Image (spheres, rainbow, N blue to C red):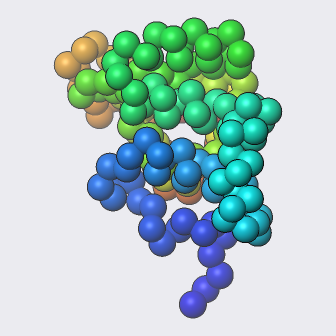
Amino acid sequence: PPERERPFDDIIEITAPPMSFIELLWSDYMANRNARPEPLWKLIALYPLRVLLNPSMLFAFLVRCAQKGPPWIKYFVHSLQIHLFSSEVYDFGGPDGIVLGPGVSWPHPYGILIGRAAKIGAGVTMYNHVNVGANRHVPVGGLVSQGAHVGDRAVLYGYVVLMGPL
């Protein structure tokens, strides 16, 4: 079989059943670790420390809290994202909310804006100042198809702007 660039290529697809909060955190952690070989006990033991000290892991944690947490938590997450990273990735609720697949990596999580109606696949890497959203304001209950769709395993380098259905 051909070599895989990432260890989750065969198990993570955006069309897969929804994953739990812990599964999403673990998939982001493994994407951030970039498949560096470490024993499982070390990965688990160092996870809390890495989340606290690594901006990429902290941002991924905040994003997943907004995605899977109770609806009221998104306001706290939004505030923390703005104050710590000047980023906004928090509006996951409703039919036109953000759809974010597992295994997302944020190497430089500063200035990232992902708006309503954006659909982002699994294993995506997003660098600093990426802007993904709709081509114009999508009202609540509006057409979700107006948002940008980013496929699985895409890499969005710094200062990329994707607006509208691409």
Q: Is residue 113 left or right of residue 95?
A: right
Residue reaching furthest to the left: 141
Seen as rendered, the residue at the extreme bottom is 1
Against 141, residue 79 (above or below) is above
* Number of marks in the rendered image: 0
Question: Is residue 56 in view from this perspective?
Answer: no
The residue under the point 41% across, 59% down is: 13
162 vs 11, nearest the viewer: 11
Towards the viewer: 22 or 6: 22
Name the quadrant containing residue 48.
top right
140 vs 28, nearest the viewer: 28
The quadrant the C terminus occupies is top left
User: Residue 67 location, x and y as percent?
Assistant: 42, 31
Task: Tell me the quadrant of the picture where the N terminus can be found.
Answer: bottom right
Q: Residue at x 38, y 37 (%)?
A: 99
Outermost residue, right side: 53
Q: Quadrant of residue 157?
A: top right
Say above or below: 132 vs 7: above
Write down the quadrant of residue 66 in the picture: top left
Residue 87 in percent (x, y) is at 63, 19
Question: Residue 151 location in percent, x, y?
Answer: 47, 51
Seen at 43% across and 41% down, the residue is 21
Q: Is residue 119 visible?
A: yes
Residue 53 lies left or right of residue 154; in this view the side is right
Q: Position of residue 28 (x, y in %)?
A: 59, 48
Relative height, residue 139 to residue 33 (above, below): above
In the picture shown, does residue 157 fall above or below 114? below
Q: Horizontal placement of 84 versus 116: left or right?
A: right
